[in-house]
Image: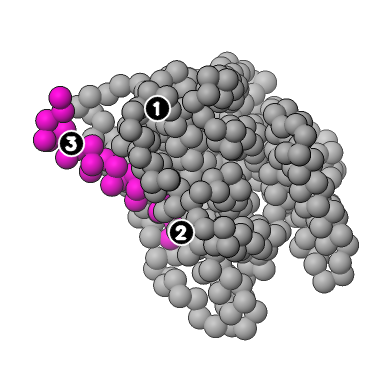
């Protein structure tokens, strides 16, 4: 029997998790500056860390794999970095402006990034192993969607009123750490660093609204779907194709008959809309995002005149870094201390966009390979494979519905594909919803009297 104090701790832990799902969108506002920016939801992860100290435990096999990915591999890379790799003199000589930021101090930053990695694992493990989270799963999803709707509405205001008509932004400057303020940004990005990270959260909202039909009344659900789709298109981010391909993959892999035809038709309609929109003379951003940027990202270029070519270029440099440190990499978050040394290692000639003091490989797969080596990337692949197989096993046992199964497979594929565009691996917004799905897999069929606010 759990004592009164134990019940109070569990409820407090759940309250922190509830706040996490609401505040996960607030990535570049309400931050604490300590050399770098400590996000408000990372402060909540610190609380979860202290709550887990009295009884540390690994929730399941998925969390065990991520323990090696987030804790063991970065620690091994950190040892290698400090004993053989660190070169602050060369980095500061190349980028003297980096001296003013503790976040880019070659001696301090690696420890800070390893701490962020630890917080990610603590958050994922805590959510995955909480029975109270399972019993309130739908409540958490509704909070996540509600918070997302608020951010979308703000984004529409910022785009229409601030960017187009010059109205003042409602976010004060002293609370704002965004790279691009709305008065200078033609695309919406919410409170994220850039549209490519905002669309990741929007994609999760869309997946929940499609597969969790019982969360809202039908007319409310369709209104929210249209709202989210509008926001996704207004990001003008090529990362939307990851979501389309995930739907197509899920359709061929899992569905049959009417479901398969609907998924393929929906994907073709989205692709057709993108194809037609990109040639519209007034939609230059759309045409670039779904045309030139993708071509340059996939095939590369002899220049770095645009974002797609730069992403391909930095990904290539990440692979060059991997060749020198293949097993453990250079340490989590440390690639920008070394990427500049490989600036001319490829046939690409840096032109307009160039390597900066804060630029890692702009591709999570290349970044993980460069910073955690083949060992860390192997654990990442094992994580994705294991969670897909876990969904398959639970579906065969009849413990989850077909909608939950399709949600799990589609979101896993979307996550994997969007990592080609989104690269801050130690940011918890990438992992929080997958942790919630893993929680469902851990408790479905084992907890009686499930009352998940259906």
- The image position of residue 296, as x and y in percent, is 82, 45
* Viewer-side residue, 444 vs 306: 444
Tell me the quarter of the picture where residue 223 sits: bottom right
State the count of labels. 3
Residue 70 visible in image: no
Tell me if 405 is positioned left or right of 348 in this view.
left
Query: What stretch of residues is rendered in magenta?
Result: 1-29
Q: Which mark is residue 359?
A: none
Q: Which residue is mark 3?
A: 7
How far apart, in angstroms, are the residues tagged by discs 2 and 3?
28 Å
Measuring 87% from the left and 60% from the top, which residue is drawn there? 276
Say which of marks 2 and 1 sits in front: 1
Residue 272 visible in image: yes
Q: Main secondary structure of the magenta part?
A: helix
How far apart, in angstroms, are the residues tagged by discs 1 and 3?
19 Å
Tell me the quarter of the picture where residue 316 sits: top right
Q: Quadrant of the N terminus?
A: top left
Q: Which residue is mark 2?
A: 146
Tell me if 430 is positioned left or right of 40 in this view.
right
* Earlier-in-chain disc, 2 versus 3: 3
Residue 85, placed above or below residue 298: above
* Earlier-in-chain disc, 2 versus 1: 2
Tell me the quarter of the picture where residue 371 sits: top right
Disc 3 secondary structure class: helix
* Viewer-side residue, 291 vs 338: 291
- Residue 15 among those drawn in magenta: yes
Say which of marks 1 and 3 sits in front: 1
């Amino acid at each position: 029997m759990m004592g009164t104090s134990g019940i109070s701790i569990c409820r407090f832990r759940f309250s922190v998790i509830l706040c996490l799902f609401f505040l996960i969108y607030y990535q570049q506002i309400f931050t604490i500056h300590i050399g770098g920016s400590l996000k408000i939801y990372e402060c909540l992860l610190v609380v979860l860390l202290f709550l887990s100290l009295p009884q540390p435990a690994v929730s399941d096999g998925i969390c065990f794999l991520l323990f090696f990915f987030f804790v063991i591999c970065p620690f091994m890379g950190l040892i290698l970095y400090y004993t053989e790799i660190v070169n602050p003199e060369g980095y500061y000589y190349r980028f003297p402006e980096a001296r003013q930021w503790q976040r880019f101090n070659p001696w301090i930053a690696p420890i800070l990034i390893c701490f962020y990695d630890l917080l990610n694992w603590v958050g994922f493990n805590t959510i995955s192993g909480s029975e109270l989270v399972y019993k309130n799963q739908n409540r958490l999803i509704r909070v996540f969607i509600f918070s997302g709707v608020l951010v979308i509405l703000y984004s529409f205001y910022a785009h229409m009123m601030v960017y187009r008509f010059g109205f003042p932004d409602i976010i004060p400057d002293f609370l704002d750490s965004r790279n691009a303020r709305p008065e200078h940004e033609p695309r919406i990005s919410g409170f994220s660093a850039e549209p490519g990270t905002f669309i990741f959260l929007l994609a999760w909202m869309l997946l929940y609204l499609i597969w969790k039909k019982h969360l809202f009344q039908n007319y409310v659900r369709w209104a929210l779907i249209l709202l989210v789709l509008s926001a996704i298109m207004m990001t003008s981010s090529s990362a939307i194709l990851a979501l389309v391909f995930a739907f197509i993959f899920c359709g061929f892999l899992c569905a049959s008959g009417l479901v398969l035809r609907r998924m393929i038709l929906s994907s073709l309609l989205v692709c057709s809309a993108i194809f037609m929109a990109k040639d519209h003379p007034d939609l230059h951003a759309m045409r670039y995002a779904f045309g030139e940027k993708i071509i340059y990202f996939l095939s590369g270029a002899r220049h770095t005149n645009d974002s797609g070519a730069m992403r391909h270029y930095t990904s290539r440099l990440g692979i060059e870094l991997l060749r020198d440190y293949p097993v453990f990499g250079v340490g989590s978050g440390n690639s920008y201390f070394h990427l500049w040394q490989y600036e001319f290692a490829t046939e690409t000639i840096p032109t307009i966009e160039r390597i900066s003091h804060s630029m890692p490989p702009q591709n999570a797969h290349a970044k993980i390979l460069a910073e955690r080596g083949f060992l860390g990337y192997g654990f990442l692949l094992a994580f994705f494979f294991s969670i897909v197989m876990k969904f398959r096993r639970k579906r065969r046992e009849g413990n989850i519905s077909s909608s939950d199964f399709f949600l799990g497979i589609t979101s896993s594929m979307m996550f994997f594909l969007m990592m080609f565009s989104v690269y801050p691996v130690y940011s918890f917004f990438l992992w929080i919803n997958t942790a919630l799905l893993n929680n469902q897999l851990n408790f479905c069929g084992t907890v009686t009297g499930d009352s998940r606010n259906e």
